[in-house]
Each structure stands twice: as structure tokens, then as C-alpha cells.
Amino acid sequence: MTGPLELSELDALGIDTVVVAGVDLYGKLFGKRMPVRSFRRIGEAGLHVCTCVYAWDVTQDLDELQVDFAGAHTGWHDFRLRPDLGTLRRAAWLEDTAICLADSVDEHTGEPLPIAPRSVLGEQIRRLRGDGLTAHTATELEFHLYHGTPDELRRAGYHDLSPTTLARSDYAIAPGNALEPFFRTVRRALEASGIPVEVAQAEYGLGQWEINLEYGDALETADRHVLYKSAIQELARAHGMTATFMARPLTDGMGSSCHLHASIEDVEGGHPFYDAAAARTVAPALRHAVGGLLQHTPDLMLWYAPTINSMRRLLSTDFAGNGLTWGFDNRTTTCRLITGAPEANRLEMRLPGADVNPYLATAAVLASMRDGLSHGTEPGEPSLGDAYAGQDTGLPETLAEAAERFDRSAFTAAAFGKDVAKHYADVARNEWRVFLRSVGDWDRERYFESI
């Protein structure tokens, strides 16, 4: 596996292009590409980028969404993408190309933009380190893979989709063998880019797949996550296919998850979540972390379920968690505990779908865990058996509800800042308004002749 690169290595590796990329509100990469000589010249000063990338919706519409951060009222001013040279690596899914992730910073002060997802997560990491703790995380990211390029599927209106498996294939080897030429290319590209793969498998839904990456520190995991998504989508396109990370692409299909695992380590390399003498080796710190996570989940649903489509997955029983529940190795709960070895004791947050922004969801988990640790929050009794049975979730069920709770939450304001909370809430409110005004296939099929 190739790790981070030094500037001096680029020429020897035959790399002639560098992509400098930030991460937008939706967890997508944006930025510019340039010859290696230009990348050396900009150094850590970075690139000028218009603030529109944090002030438009997921379709880049500039007319609907109005936010305080940027717009005509600010003259659409610039910020800077400042390369984080520790992230410079080969983008092996592209020819002779490297990629360097960048922090979004204020044009004049050089301080991180508070609303930028990488800044949001970085602040929570710094707060944990102030407590003498380091977070280790992993994301289990599922996706659906369809025959046909993105352009072909768009022209067809995303109708009559042809999935890459036609029967349920969870854990099955043979369907994976059929697509192994593609997935071998994916694994090799990820490994060559310093994005270590742990396992890959066919999933339960038709055309559904999962690739898990090795765990790492929280920022590195989020970085790998967005690069992995980019690689999958680009390689799928090159092979005449389309990968979607929608939380639920079809009404009668399976939802795609992004289960988020988290553990902590202290300054001496100890594992506060582990207690060999305790039942199931669960230390009080792990219980308190779970307590904090569940206590603040209703207020943070906007970052766990950031789109209209997210809620469609959560209103199912697609192993998407359920309410304020936790349990030991129980996949019907919102928070599943995996226990045994000191370094492996961890919690798994099961609410997020594949459409989640990993920086924001991880920041939400870490902030909640930290609050639970500091207040000694107890999570109550664990769920035994089916946690879906007879449960009132207690969670927002629409994007509009999630936005209001997020914006009004005292915890959200304290953890992330009032301006950050308002910005993301305003983006979600706009998405909800656009949705309510839109007339789609569901309306016509249900009402056209029947009303």
C-alpha cells in the first residue's frame, strides 16, 4: 500500500497532475487540478475559491438557497483552499494523478471556516485531545451499483434501473466473482492510494455492495471515506456503470447504510472503553459515551440523516437503528456495542445512511460521546431481542423537523456554534421547501386518475 507522498516524490512517480480538493456541505469533493509545478508554487498558501460552494444546494442552485455566510449580499467573496500536505497521495483511479485534500480557510485571517465540514470535525478532535483522548473511527459504507453510465441513467429519468445483482446475495461469493474484475480494480486503486481496504462483499439489496476500510484516527477516516466514494463513482463510470450512495434508491429496495464505529485512546495508549473485570468488558466510560450519544441523537439527526431520502431509509426496518436504543451485538438498535478485546471495544452508530457527510456525522458522534463522558450520562438498560418491537423512536421523521431541532438545540450551539447550526438548518429548510413544491412520479401515480 502506498501512503502519503512527499512533494519530492511526484516527478519520480510519473505524476503530472495534482487535484486540490475541499469537501462541501454534502460530503462531495470540489476544487481544482493543476500541473505539479503549479502545485509546488501555490504551496500552503492555497487556492482562491468562491464561497458559492458553501452557499448553494446539492444541485448547485443559486436562486433558492439564501444563507448568511455568502451570496449577493457579500459580493460572492472568496475563501482559500489551503492544502493539507499530510494528505497528498496518489489518486490511482486516475492516470498519473495525485490528490491533496485541503482545509477551507478565511481569505484574510487564514482561520478555518467554521461551517466547512473538515473544520467542524477538526474542532471536535481538538476538544477531545484537550481531554487527553484520541478518537479512532471506521465507516462501513454500502452503495448500489447499476448498469449504465450516470449520463445514460439521467437521460432515462432513472427509470428501469438494471442492478448488478438480480437476486439477494448477502455474503454470497459467486455474485462477487462475476464482478471481480471491476472490484479488483477498485481494491487495487484504493490500496495504491493509501486507502487500505479491510473487506468487501455483496450485500442484501439488488445491486448492493459494501467495501469496508481499515479504521484510523477520526480525520483520516473521514478523508479516506470521501476519496473512496470518489474512486468508486469514477471507476464505475469508466466501466459503464453507476454507483449511487442514496440512502434508499428504490421504494421497494434495501437502504444503504454508513454504520459509524468509534473508540477512544488515552495519552498513555490505554483503552478507556475496556474493563477486563466488568461484565462484557464494558467500562463505565463506554456506557457514558453511549449515554451521551443517545441523549443528543434527536438534536443531531440533521447530520445523521441529511436529505429527504435519508428519512425513507429510517422509516424502514433496514437495520437502520431504532430510536434511543442500544444493545450488545444487536443490529436492531441505534447504538450497537462490540466488545471483547481492549483495542476493539467500541460503539457502532447505526443511524447514518450512505448519503451522510462523514465529517459531520463523526463530529456529531464525538461531541455527543465527549458530553456523555464529562457528565457521566447513563444510557439506561440495553435492548434485548428485537429493538423495533413496540418502540416510539422519539426522533424527527422529516428533514424539516430535524432542521428545527438542530437549529434550536442548546447542545448543538455549544458544540458547533450558533452560526454553524443556523447555516446547516437553513440549507435543510430550503431543501424541504424545494421538495414540497416539486411534483413527481409519486404524485401522478397516486392522484392523476384517482382524485
Image (cartoon, grey):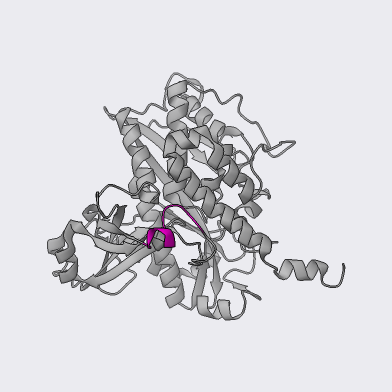
Vertical placement of residue 223 versus 183, above or below: above
Residue 112's spot in the image, x, y percent?
30, 48
Residue at the top extreme? 277
- Which residue is painted at 25% across and 63% down in the image? 47
Q: Is residue 41 left or right of residue 374?
A: left
Residue placed most toward the observer, 382 or 7: 7
Q: Quadrant of the N terminus?
A: bottom left
Q: In which quarter of the image is residue 447?
A: bottom right
Q: Residue furthest front?
A: 73
In the picture provided, is 108 more to the left or to the right than 351?
A: left
Residue 197: in sight, yes or no?
Answer: no
Viewer-proximal residue, 422 or 343? Answer: 422
- Magenta residues, as a range? 66-76
Displayed quadrant of residue 23: bottom left
> What residue lies at 46% left-to-right and 40% top-to-bottom?
418
Q: Residue furthest right?
A: 450
Determine the image quadrant of residue 276: top left
Residue at left 58%, top 40%?
Answer: 405
Q: Where is residue 443 in the image (x, y as percent from the top left)?
A: 75, 67
Point 63% across, 53% down: residue: 313
Place of residue 342 in the rendered image (x, y in percent of width and height, measured from the top left): 39, 30
Quadrant in the picture for the C terminus: bottom right
Q: Does residue 338 appear to the left or right of 103 in the view shown?
A: right
Residue 279, position in %: x, y?
51, 21
